[in-house]
Amino acid sequence: MEPIVVVGGGLAAARATQTLRDQGYDGDLVVLTAEAFPPYERPPLSKDYLRGEAGTDALFPHDADWYADRGVDLRTSTTAVGLDVAGSAIETAPGGSLRYSRLLLATGSQVRRLDVPGNDLDGVHHLRTIDDADRLRTALGDDGPLVVVGDGWIGMEVAASARQLGRDVTVVGRSPHPLHGLGARVSEIFTNLHEENGVRLLRATAVTALTGTGSVSGVELDDGTTLEASTVVVGVGVTPRCDLAAEAGIELRSAADGDGVAVDGTLRTSAPGVWAAGDIASVPSVRYGRALRVEHWAFADETGKHAARAMLGSAEPYDVLPYFFTDQFDLGMEVKGVTSGEVVISGSAADRECVAFWVDGDRVQAGMGINVWDRMDDVEDLIRAEGPVDRAALDAFV
Ligand code: FAD
């Protein structure tokens, strides 16, 4: 029997591998990851790992010995460069090929780059890998001004970490307010948090060029001004790495439907014997009635496990609500569901101790706990409840 092959070096790959063994699969199992490390999780890279408060232990669900002890053929620094779904074969670099009985694609995301002059100057950073975080951590040791381009989750987390390390930090965002997908009221909670901690936030502002000779020294803005910068972090989003699947003719979702590899409820792709999990997987949602592709830790965790069970024969449809967490300064947040609709806040937004709900039509779509813990099961019950939503119960939730 040919091996099961997992392609990927993130949490989805780690969880799938673990689950295959936990569920009793004792056949040949190969993990191919382009990076030099065993599969790892990325949230600490913008938080405690970046600040030097946590080591690599915080990153690895399993070390290399764990794979060896379980007879998993872990091939680091090995990239899958070709996929032949008719022949059930993968081509790798450095050169080689292997056949598979079942294949999991968990190739994750890659960072978007700024399409402006100067984007390749020294001192311009992106953050996706351990190597990126190590480089940025070294750069944060300098005391010059830091400019973060992008006011999404990664940008705001890096801004918080850099500020905690004493850097002068400016965040440049294109939207009317940071974390714009959350809407103005919830964004304001994060805006106030950052401004009270000394982060400068520029809204509705575009970067037109990064300037400097060899190393970056300035960030030109569309209002004609230039910010001084010794370090620039670009956090303008990611794109799913679907090229391997696409070149093999596996069905993808359109950009209008959120991109990604199209899978069914068992995370099976359009190619026989091929599954997908993590950031690349666009999964039909039972609750929301449409496909969702979620670029978060918990989705990689859950879909990695689910795909492994499906590869071993489970026909259970995936039905886990999206979940995300962040830590910035003294704020801890977790959110379940899809944040669209009208916002209802229970508790005190001013004191940053509240739960925000998103209500669309007569149903709760999502709930976010801000410094409020252990209520996510209750939030999930509300999201799954058939309408009409009880507004008084939402107001009194905290
Ligand atoms: P990835 O983690 O992207 O891993 C994919 C791996 O596959 C990479 O190692 C890549 O090199 C490898 N690969 C790709 N193509 C090939 C190939 N052809 N051959 C071999 N290997 C290949 N989420 C949260 O919920 N909360 C957070 O606080 C949070 N913080 C984050 C902070 C940072 C700095 C980053 C970068 C992400 C954060 N996320 C957070 C998002 C979360 O980390 C991702 O959703 C998660 O990493 C996705 O896991 P994955 O396994 O799908 O893919």
Image (tube, rainbow, N blue to C red):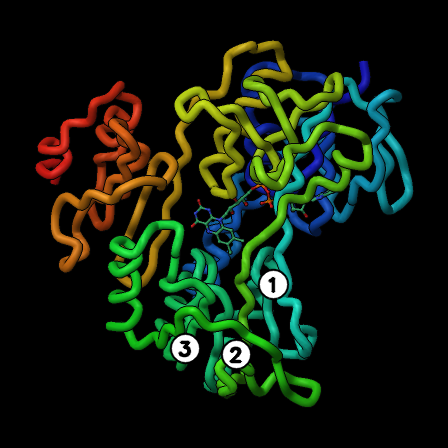
Pick whichever, 302 or 58, lies toward us: 302
* Residue that label 3 marks: 169
Residue drawn at point x = 40 percent, y = 67 percent: 161
The kind of secondary structure element at disc 3 is strand
* Residue that label 1 marks: 132
The kind of secondary structure element at disc 2 is loop
The answer to whether residue 248 is seen in the rendering is yes
- For label 3, count other residues whose C-alpha is less than 10 Å away and answer few (under 14), some (14-19) or many (20+): many
CA–CA distance between discs 2 and 3?
19 Å
- For label 2, count other residues whose C-alpha is less than 10 Å away and answer few (under 14), some (14-19) or many (20+): few
Percent of width and height locating residue 67: 64, 34
The answer to whether residue 20 is seen in the rendering is no
Q: Judge left or right: residue 92 versus residue 186.
A: right
- For label 1, count other residues whose C-alpha is less than 10 Å away and answer few (under 14), some (14-19) or many (20+): some
Q: Judge left or right: residue 244 versus residue 186.
A: right
- The mark closer to the camera, 1 or 3, is 3
The kind of secondary structure element at disc 1 is helix
Query: What kind of residue is marked 2?
Result: Asp
Proximity of marks 1 and 3: CB atoms separated by less than 8 Å? no
Q: Judge left or right: residue 150 versus residue 10.
A: left
Percent of width and height locating residue 375: 21, 35
Percent of width and height locating residue 366: 31, 36
* Residue that label 2 marks: 222
Percent of width and height locating residue 234: 56, 67
Q: Is residue 35 above or below residue 107?
A: below
Residue drawn at point x = 58 percent, y = 39 percent: 256
Q: Is residue 142 above or below residue 310?
A: below
User: Which quarter of the figure is the N terminus placed in?
Assistant: top right
